[in-house]
Image (cartoon, rainbow, N blue to C red):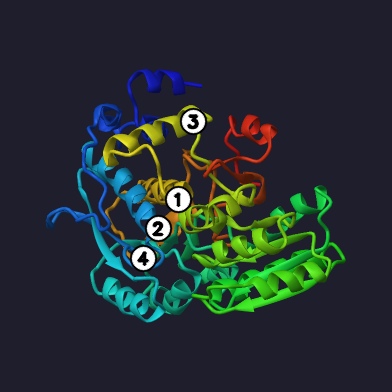
Amino acid sequence: MILSKRARLGAALAWAIAAMIAPVIAPAIALAQAPASTPATAAVPAPTPSGNTLRIGVIGPFTGASADFGVPMLQGIQLAVDQINAVGGYIGRPIELVIKDDKANPDEGLKQSEALAKEKVAAVLGFCNTGVAMKSLDVFQANKLPLIVPCATGTAITAKFPAPESYIFRMSARDAIQAPFVLEDAFKRGWDKVAIFADKSGYGEGGLKDVEKALAAKNARPVYVARFDLGVKDLSEEVKEAKAAGAEAIFSYTVGPENAVIARARKAHAPKLPQIGAWPLSFPFFIDGGKEAAEGALMAQTFIAEPSNERRAAFLASYARKYKSSKIAVPMAAAQGYDAAYLLLYSLFNVRDGNLTGPVVKNALENVTRVYYGVVTTYDKPFSAADKDAITPNMLVMGKVQNGAITFAYPEDAKRNLTVQRKQ
């Protein structure tokens, strides 16, 4: 490997650029010396527009209830774009981000998606909330505008349209692989009687179905199901009923402070009942809101903010330098946003005539010819006409809340994480 050489150059991500065709990216090695000094903000301003810029849309919840993972996604994208622009952008064209705040509101998301479709952007990176994304997908499909989803995990997002015609791509682990992955771990621990706590949002509805399907594959059913509205303040009665039903674990599917509500009720009424779930159990809303009640919770992760290899160490150092903070609110969101921006650039380098219409960009994403050595994983043919999801189960690890932070649930996962997985 040549990673150590790039690290000695002080590369934030020279390893990512160096795999490109040399005549196209000769200046890319200078990326190693690119400064990163812009402080973190809730809404990162786009560069001053220029007639020569390559315009990329970004949409997500940068204010409001889901900003805790929307802002890290945006910061990851901005970090990647700043590094790319520092070495000349896309074949001499600086990248300009056109940023829209969906406020985690489906109606606002639809409005901002329609605005992006009129902005003449080459592609869009975005969405953190499944329900928000689902209401807007028709806009991207109808306008033949490629969308890469860095965060939202609802299975339906990449299943709404037939894959060969779909303009919807994703860089996060869909719930259809998170649910069975977490349940497989639970069953290995002897927790085969599972209660499901799911909110009534599109995310919760989809997650409930995925967990039930994963249980059915093991000839099992949930021993108890609790449905609740977003904003619920107490789930004590539901936890008591789950315990009485013989539950050995609570699988929670909600994205906000409701996860902490479950944790507090669990600690008060069933302290020995573990809480397991998808990646929102790694969010500040859960960890900070649940405090001691959140300790020990287990969840699926694609990226844990530990310098387990040189790519991740370089990313974490670059993030800390740019945003003046060594702590990322939701590391997965930042890393997946970062990789999404670079992977889009990788695909565009296959377009040599400057024709970046929607169908051309779609085809380029489906036929990425060079391996991108990313932060989350190694992207080797991440997409195709038949497959719009870049993440496969072998890329997941179990995370655990420990001392108010996320770490590897198993030492062997930490060792396995030294070698970044490829798509299977």
- The label on residue 348 is none
Q: CA distance from mark 4 to mark 2?
A: 9 Å
The residue positioned 40% from the left and 58% from the top of the image is 68
* Disc 4 target residue: 61
- Residue type of the residue flagged with mark 1: Val
Q: Is residue 38 left or right of residue 419?
A: left
Place of residue 300 in the rendered image (x, y in percent of width and height, measured from the top left): 62, 51
- Residue type of the residue flagged with mark 3: Pro
Residues marked 1 and 3 touching at CB (< 8 Å): no
Q: CA distance from mark 3 to mark 4?
A: 28 Å
For label 4, the crowd category at 10 Å Cα-Cα, with few meaning under 14, some 14 to 19 and many 20 or more, is: many
* Disc 2 target residue: 68
- Residue type of the residue flagged with mark 4: Pro
The residue positioned 24% from the left and 32% from the top of the image is 34
Q: Earlier in the sequence, mark 1 or mark 4?
A: 4
Q: CA distance from mark 1 to mark 4?
A: 13 Å
* Disc 3 target residue: 307
